[in-house]
Amino acid sequence: MKKVTSMIFTLGFAIAVSAQAPSAQPAKKTVVTPEAVKKAFDQKFPSATKVKWGMENAKEWEAEFNFKGSEFSANFTSDGTWVETEKEIKVTELPKAVADAIAKQYAGWAITEADRTETAKNGTIYEADIKNGKGKKEVAFKEDGTPVAE
């Protein structure tokens, strides 16, 4: 009987210990922002606060931050080359030509979000997230309503 009681006690103890052990989830990979990227960011946005870094994609770093009282995001390549800076705006702040172009080219679609984006490639563009009953998409236009292929 002592052996059975001892085995039950040992088994119960092993179960209790294993239940409290940390889970075997993989550790999150720590991503280090390259110094060239940080330096380029600091030069472009010297008074930025609350900066949070992440990867936009395999080739671009993205900083989300506060600057001059507004929230922005900016993308840089690994060598520190600036790609774009984006600021969310109210849908009502879209230039009339952009809103009109969306209404004409995407009749029946609703604009859900809008951004004013400064890009190295296209200058100032306006991006809008639009949706209808079937799906969602992002569209981009120059201030005069000309579509921008991204």
Image: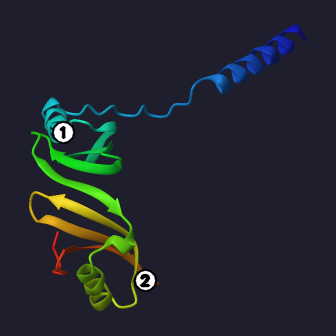
Residue lying furthest top? 2
Secondary element at tag 1: helix
> Residue 123, relative to residue 15: is it above or below?
below
Residue sitting at x 32%, y 88%: 103
Residue 27 location (% of width, % of height) = 42, 31
Query: Left of 123 or right of it: where is 3?
Result: right
Residue 63 location (% of width, % of height) = 28, 43
Secondary element at tag 2: loop
Give the residue number, with chain letter if any, for mark 1.
Answer: 41
Residue 78 location (% of width, % of height) = 14, 40
Q: Quadrant of the N terminus?
A: top right
What scheme was used to colour the molecule? rainbow
Query: Left of 39 or right of it: where is 19?
Result: right
Mark 1: amino acid: Phe
Residue sitting at x 82%, y 11%: 6
The quadrant in which residue 145 appears is: bottom left
Query: Left of 119 or right of it: where is 48?
Result: right
Circles 2 and 1: CB atoms closer than 8 Å: no
Work out whether residue 124 or residue 6 is closer to the camera in this orientation and state it: 124
Give the residue number, with chain letter if any, for mark 2.
Answer: 132
Mark 2: amino acid: Asn
Residue 9 location (% of width, % of height) = 80, 15
Query: Left of 91 or right of it: where is 77?
Result: left
Q: Residues within 10 Å of mark 1 (few under 14, many from 20)?
A: many
> Residue 127, relative to residue 36: is it above or below?
below
Q: Is residue 115 visible?
A: yes
The quadrant in which residue 91 appears is: bottom left
